[in-house]
Image (spheres, rainbow, N blue to C red):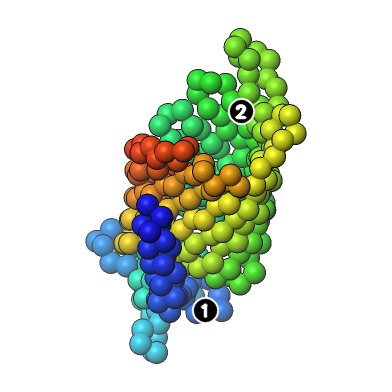
Amino acid sequence: MKKFLLLVSLLLIQHLVVSQSAFRPLATDSVTYFIRTFNGKEFIGKIIEETDSSFTVRIFNNGGESFVLIPKKEAKETKIVQPGDLVNGQYWGTIPNISYTFSPSGYPLRKGQWYFQNIWIIYNQLNYGVTNHLQLGVGGLIPNGMLWANARITLPIIPNRLSIGGAINYSLVSNASFVIYEPKYLIAYGFATVGSPHANFSVGYGRVYNKDNNSLSLYVVSGAIRASKSVLMITENYIDERVNEQTHLVGIRTGRKTLTLTVGVSFTKVYSFRVLPWVGFGVRFGKK
């Protein structure tokens, strides 16, 4: 298992080094748009003129430029191109990926966006982008009565290349009556993400405090690689300071626009390894 995880980490790093030249946003000094028409044609360029009935788009091709008039009634989809949306000049968009599975990535929600995540029905998390850098969330486990609230700050050091961040999570657990809730855990966590939305890995360190004020250290290594327009491969690995307790997750996330489905396998070691399948989905909504 350790050899397998080391191999995955090496492949992630190799893929990041090779892919950075391919995963580059379009170099422009103003807003760039992606337009798809009802007949399947796709255009990437700047809207230099807009009327009530049409767009005039300036398109860059092989060092040159051309102009296309697109009637609005023929435009099925019009989006602002975000950093990382373009791969080798083709529009891939981004698969919603504010977290690998549970741990955060350096690509959070933008201001005004919401994201709901569910795993095996019992795990539910709702996040909101207060700003482009601050995200707040609430969640709970069903039916054991655990509730939590969290906050996350993400700061891009080199846009689309390097981000750092921190998060705090405070949880409560109910008694048998599900009426009285008592403090359970406080988690303080810092992380760094290297790479683009299409190929990245993150390392993090956290402290977990329980209601008796006992604490332990938690180390997290996560990664994601975009395999295609609609497939993202992810891995997430937790090791606490006692070393003998570990959790490793490997999964595939598929979807585009706002809805994603993730399936995978978790390997949990508490003195011995146990293998469990897991499945979940995510929905992003609000501001686009």
Counting residues from the N terminus, which is met first, the one under dot 2 or under dot 1?
1
**Residue occupying the far left of the picture:** 39
Numbered disc 2: secondary structure:
strand
Left or right relative to 95: residue 39: left
Residue lying at 40% horizontally and 82% vertically, measured from the top left: 60
* Residue 24 drawn at (x, y percent): 46, 75
* Residue 118 drawn at (x, y percent): 45, 35
**Residue occupying the far bottom of the picture:** 63
**Within 10 Å of the Cα at label 2, are there few (<14), some (14-19), or many (20+) other Cα atoms?**
many
Q: Amino acid at mark 1?
A: Thr
Residue 51 visible, this orientation? no
Residue lying at 44% horizontally and 69% vertically, measured from the top left: 13
Above or below: residue 262 compared with residue 235: above
Task: Tell me where residue 19 sits by quadrant.
Answer: bottom left
* Residue for badge 1: 28
Q: Nearer the viewer, residue 121 or 27?
A: 121
* Residue 104 drawn at (x, y percent): 56, 51
Residue lying at 33% horizontally and 55% vertically, measured from the top left: 231
How far is the residue under mark 2 from the one under mark 1?
45 Å
**Within 10 Å of the Cα at label 1, are there few (<14), some (14-19), or many (20+) other Cα atoms?**
few
* Residue 82 drawn at (x, y percent): 50, 65
Q: Amino acid at mark 2?
A: Leu
**Residue occupying the far right of the picture:** 213
Q: Nearer the viewer, residue 83 or 266?
A: 266
Q: Nearer the viewer, mark 2 or mark 1?
A: 2
Residue 11 visible, this orientation? yes
Residue lying at 49% horizontally and 32% vertically, measured from the top left: 123
* Residue for badge 2: 147
Task: Tell me where residue 23 sits by quadrant.
Answer: bottom left
